[in-house]
Amino acid sequence: MSELRLSLRVRIIAVLTAVLTVGAVALGFAAWHSSWLAAQQAYDRLLSGGAVQIAENVYVQGGVVTVDPPVSAIATLAAYDLVFYKVVDPRGVVVAGYDDLMSDADSVDIRAGVVLEDGLYQGQPVRIASLARQLELPGTNNWTTIVVAQTTEARRALARDLTLKALGVIAVMSVLALLATAYAVTLALKPLTRIEREIASRRPDDLRPIAAEPPNEVRNLVQAIDGFMHRLSERMAIMQRFIADAAHQIRTPLAALDAQVEILLGTPASRRKAETVTRIHERTAELGRLTGQLLDHAMVIHRRDAAAMAAVDLNQLAKSVLAKAVPLSLPREVDIAFVPAETSPTVNGDAISLREALSNLIDNALRHGARSRLIVTVGGDHGGTWIEVADDGEGFAAPVSELLLPFAKGLTSAGSGLGLSIATEVAQAHHGTLEVSRNDGMTRVRLRLASS
């Protein structure tokens, strides 16, 4: 990825440069238009004044229209450009000036005042002022026409000069605006630089909130980062505690297994040896179950925030889990029943995590609870939907709050104490709870979930 895309400063300055460039071009055109209008109006006033002065010097002498050209007016106009004029008497006879100087102005309009227009004379663009003056002559048509033309080079030069000066001002202001913006952006990004340095200088296990005070525009971003680090810190604490507890729990069956192997090695072939092999088999099975539950617990913790949720039919889920969780043979006679809900409730959840939670609850009930009965029930009430595993065992000796923690023990010291913890993690991930109760001679563990 290029620096242009990475750097917020460069992107802001680039966008502002583009905006200022477009604005400068637009202002340049506006400056040219305004300058041309200003030059046009200034020279039009001079041209109109010159035409009026010539008209005032037209008079009748001996019945003939005569003109005494005002030298000062013509000199003023000629100081900037070439000047041409023509005076036509009421008969249409040119009494002074250039015969071929023509005007397209309407005769009615020029009698009301000076009429200005653009034209072409002797191959040069000119500005033409036309004016009619009424003289005291016999007859009805006694209007004399005065036409004055001036080339436009001086106008264009003035407009060009005004435009260049305006463009200079626009360029200076654009550069100043760009420099001011670059400086302002640098000042505005300084808090982000401090935040960056603070995060970069931290140790990997330092997940405290960011101490640098952020500007208001990025306060929500910094708060989101703080929230993420807080959740990450909690998750790391859970995993560290879990790893420490798991290491402690695994050492016990490993030590017992090692002791049984030592006994086996030092015992001659006899019935004692067969009993030792049986205990080794039991310890190995216990270690395998503990390892499986540890992996299940880690998987549930991982899927809590990573798994995609989908609609799960609780009747179908409970039926399939019960069929797989009950072993083909049990050391004692247990009556197993499944009571589905009438309406097949569904929840928006992670089917894999729910399956693991229910499987652990059923396994716990069969191994450490049920003496002769186990019932799996799916139902719902005003608090949501639920799956309940009930057995006729003696229940739990430890308080419920302790049972829901990892490696907590129930009535006996057998087992890893992970079954209820896994179910609790799954319930919390689905915005639900795990409820433990005892009534009607049955110990009931209910996995309550929020309805979809």
Image (cartoon, helix red, strand yellow):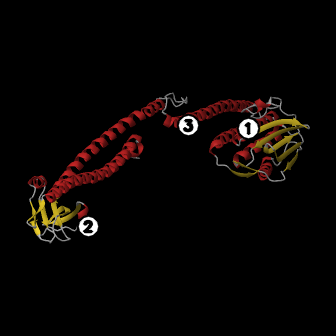
Say whether marks 2 and 3 touch (CB < 8 Å).
Answer: no
Query: Image quarter for residue 235?
Result: top right
The residue furthest front is: 138
Residue to which mark 3 is pinned: 224
Residue 97 visible to the viewer: no
Q: Which residue is mark 2?
A: 108
Say above or below: 341 vs 138: above
Q: Residue 424, labelled with which disc?
A: 1
Task: From the viewer's perspective, tell me whether residue 26 is left or right of residue 72.
Answer: right
| Residue 323 rendering spot, x and y as whole percentages | 80, 51
In the image, residue 103 above or below residue 185: below
The residue sitting at 21% across, 53% down in the picture is: 45
Picture coordinates of residue 95 (x, y %)?
Answer: 10, 67
Amino acid residing under circle 3: Ala
Measure how far apart labels 2 and 3 are at the Cα level. Answer: 79 Å
In the rendered structure, the answer to whether residue 67 lies left or right of residue 178 reads left
Q: Earlier in the sequence, mark 2 or mark 3?
A: 2
User: What residue sits 71% from the left and 52% below the top?
Assistant: 311
